[in-house]
Image (tube, rainbow, N blue to C red):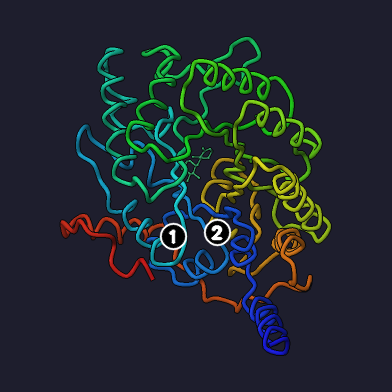
């Protein structure tokens, strides 16, 4: 009997070593590790999808689950992209993290129309009920409201069309409507510059403390974590911040991690970037109320957001050109592996180089064709 048990133990260790990827290591400790998938995903770019399914247990829609994408015109919902992503996740043993129900950007007719407070509240209520209800039981976490706190030291709330039309208490209602649609989904408030300590983080803390005190059904706070590789909050401040949110009974998720560098990155910059990713993940793993770590993109050469939003910057992700792992990937792998008994800390599995993938245009074209053909099921060929 002892020999059989010994054999099983060795086999399991060998088996784990043989297949270890970030996803395997994260699953071994029930940790949510994911990446945001952009339009390239819909270009049927196999290496892009393979990396997602092999390395992460969660996928977030970078773009396609925002208000303006799901409801481009009032009452005319468009589910192809979001349904396809959910189908891909289900087919590949992954979860989908919902992002985001209400944001002052990418809000289509809601931002451009003229609505009374009551009309805008009714539109948001319907949107949230429709979207959260459609994915009830399929999406375990939603960013309900995104970026409502002001960056301006003289004001608490961001001066958006949402705030101006409805006043800030629309946020309480959004959480309550999401809870009505799904009693089990984890509901998050998502923000940036609330990662460490400082004015905006303090304002965010006070804001979510108010939500809790009013009995609003909020479960967690998202820390976006978009920074230059050489200037991010101290890990000690991140730790203090996560602990004070734990004191409110709130979960914390790192929701959009990327640490940008001015290309071409040098080895020393990549080494610092490794410390950035590894240190941030270590802070999360060290706190029981931090069980989610999402990276904002799949690979550097497919990241839309950094070069367009921070011209001259890029190389922000753990996978570089042609999906090759960078030192940042090794850092994530080492930190996760250190917490999985029996996994030898060694070089993560090398990824085979992938042919140059497709850009955004094919993704848009593919989705457009699907629309044109009046297809309503998930985009063909996307889920494998
Ligand atoms: C960005 C996407 O990455 C871009 O592709 C899109 O054009 C604009 O939005 N904070 C957020 C994310 O909460 O939704 C934003 O994502 C990046 C900043």
71 sits to left or right of 174: left
The mark that comes first in sequence, 1 or 2, is 1
Residue under circle 2?
A: 298
Residue plotted at (77% across, 39% down)? 231
As displayed, is residue 312 above or below residue 330? above
Q: Residue at x 33, y 42 (%)?
A: 69
Q: Which residue is mark 1?
A: 40
**Is 134 situated above or below 92?**
above
The quarter of the picture where residue 89 lies is: bottom left
- CA–CA distance between discs 1 and 2? 10 Å
From the top left corner, tell me how far across and down residue 101 is, in percent.
39, 35
Looking at the image, residue 207 lies above or below residue 359: above
Check the image and name the residue furthest to the left: 374
- Circle 2 SS class: loop
Q: Quadrant of the N terminus?
A: bottom right
Residue 356 vs residue 203: left or right?
left
Which residue is the extreme one toward the front? Answer: 1
Left or right? Give the position of 170 relative to 73: right
Q: Residue 54's spot in the image, x, y percent?
A: 54, 69
């Amino acid at each position: 009997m002892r020999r059989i048990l010994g054999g099983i133990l060795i086999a399991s260790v060998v088996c784990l070593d043989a297949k270890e990827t970030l996803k395997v290591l994260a699953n071994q400790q029930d940790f949510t590790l994911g990446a945001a998938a952009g339009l390239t995903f819909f270009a049927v770019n196999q290496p892009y999808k393979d990396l997602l399914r092999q390395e992460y247990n969660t996928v977030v829609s970078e773009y396609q689950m925002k208000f303006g994408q799901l409801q481009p015109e009032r009452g005319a919902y468009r589910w192809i992209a979001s349904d396809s992503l959910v189908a891909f996740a289900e087919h590949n043993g992954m979860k989908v993290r919902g992002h985001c129900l209400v944001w002052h950007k990418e809000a289509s007719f809601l931002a451009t129309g003229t609505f009374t407070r009551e009309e805008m509240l009714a539109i948001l209520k319907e949107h949230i009920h429709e979207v959260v209800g459609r994915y009830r039981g399929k999406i375990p976490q939603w960013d309900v409201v995104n970026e409502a706190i002001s960056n301006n030291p003289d004001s608490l709330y961001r001066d958006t069309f949402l705030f101006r039309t409805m006043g800030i208490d629309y946020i309480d209602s959004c959480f309550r409507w999401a809870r009505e649609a799904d009693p089990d989904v984890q509901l998050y408030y998502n923000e940036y510059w609330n990662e460490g300590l400082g004015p905006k983080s303090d304002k965010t803390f006070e804001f979510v403390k108010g939500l809790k005190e009013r009995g609003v059904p909020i479960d967690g706070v998202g820390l976006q974590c978009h920074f230059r590789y050489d200037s991010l909050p101290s890990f000690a401040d991140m730790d203090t911040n996560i602990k004070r949110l734990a004191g409110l009974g709130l979960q914390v998720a790192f929701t959009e991690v990327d640490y940008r560098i001015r290309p071409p990155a040098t080895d020393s910059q990549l080494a610092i970037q490794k410390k950035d990713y590894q240190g941030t993940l270590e802070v999360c793993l060290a706190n029981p109320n931090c069980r989610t770590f999402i990276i904002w993109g799949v690979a550097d050469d497919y990241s839309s957001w950094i070069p367009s939003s921070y011209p001259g910057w890029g190389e922000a992700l753990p996978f570089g050109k042609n999906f090759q792992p960078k030192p940042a990937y090794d850092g994530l792998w080492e930190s996760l592996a250190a917490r999985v008994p029996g996994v030898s800390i060694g070089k993560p599995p090398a990824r085979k180089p992938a042919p140059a993938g497709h850009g955004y245009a094919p993704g848009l074209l593919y989705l457009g064709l699907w629309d044109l053909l009046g297809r309503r099921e998930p985009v063909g060929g996307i889920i494998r």
